[in-house]
Amino acid sequence: MNKIFFVFMTAVIALGAGCSDNKAADKKPAAPSTPHYPTAVIEARSVQQAVKLPAQLAAFLQVDIFPKVNGYVTAVWVDVGSHVRQGQLLMTLEAPELVQATAQAREKYARAVADYTIDRENYERLNEASRTPGAISPMDLATDKAKAQADSALANSEKANWLMQQAMMDYLKVTAPFTGVITIRNVHPGALVDATNKSIPMLELKQVDHLRLQVDIPETIAATLRKNDTLTFSVAALPGQKLTARVARISDNINQQYRTERVEADVYNHDEVLAPGMYADVIFDSKGNRNALSVPPNAVVVSTERKYVIVIRNGKTVKVDVSTGNESDKLVEITGDVKAGEQVIAPANDEIKEGVDVR
């Protein structure tokens, strides 16, 4: 009985295995599915962005005052912090050699004038006498005329030398070239100053009631800035206060090292609360590039080698290099070989390959 049961069960198991093999044979391998990625449309629009950049305040006018002539300092009428007006006397120098040279030049000029006066009178008299035929040799007349002309030129030369010496004497009085504040003083009465030494100035003068706000704008957004645009800035000396200035000068030159463009705004500081050299934080609203296209920020892939977006063209992925501009939470400006209306993968990542079929 057990033998019959064993034979029966063996037949049943074999029959079941045969059916399973037939079902497995009927199954076919599934075709690979086309990947699906979320997409966004490239929009033809600019992106406004609030940009915060470091800046500094500088004097609108600034000059280091060096001696024009060698001499001794006799008096200094200003000190650090002195407010001076244009043309005001700052200090006086003494140069005895220059005084003597000026006196000598004056005497040489006077002698040259006297010689010219005598020679001119001689020529005029000879010219008067030459009207009588045979009285004066033409050669003598021409010689006296040439001598008078030479003495005239010599007198003019000596006069120019005398005026030059007088001008050098004027440099013994140092005056302010513009209205401002003395910020550095390096000399005192009795000091010998050398006109050839240009390493240490006698005085430094800065205009502080009118300042320059200097800020370096990244080239990606520098093109969006225009003259008379308003900049908002703050300084550590005035916590919590927001100051404003208008863009006055744009350098139109890109710094090759930092890829920035220098922009200056005028700051009027009549109360002198601000000072040259102060650090400032500048905030301005960048209006964006009018010709830029925009995509979501997560559509731009940044790798160690490139920056690109993945565009879907003819149902396949294409990686297109782009440059970015202004950016907000929702959009970022891009420029490159892309067009408005094209679809890009967003979010995109570096693992998505180029040339992949998508739907």
Image: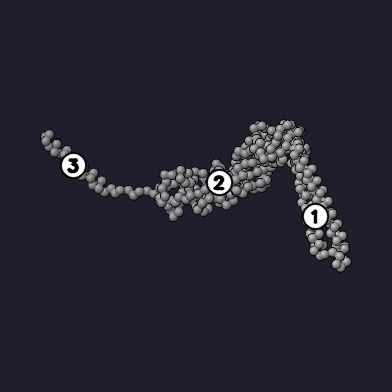
Label number found at residue 14: 3
**Quadrant of res 187:** top right
Q: Residue 68 falls in which quadrant of the image?
A: top right
Element at badge 1?
helix
Judge left or right: residue 344 versus residue 122: left
Mark 3 residue type: Ala
Residue at x 28%, y 48% (from the top left corner) = 27
Tag 1: Cα neighbours inside 10 Å, few (<14), some, or many (≥20)? some
| Residue 255 percent location from the top left of the image | 57, 45
Q: Where residue 40 appears, x then y in whole percent?
A: 50, 48
Q: Residue at x 76, y 51 (%)?
A: 157
| Identity, as a three-letter code, of the amino acid under mark 1 | Ser
Q: Which mark is residue 256?
A: 2
Residue 86 visible to the viewer? no
Q: Earlier in the sequence, mark 2 or mark 1?
A: 1
Toward the viewer: 78 or 121? Answer: 121
Q: Quadrant of the N terminus?
A: top left
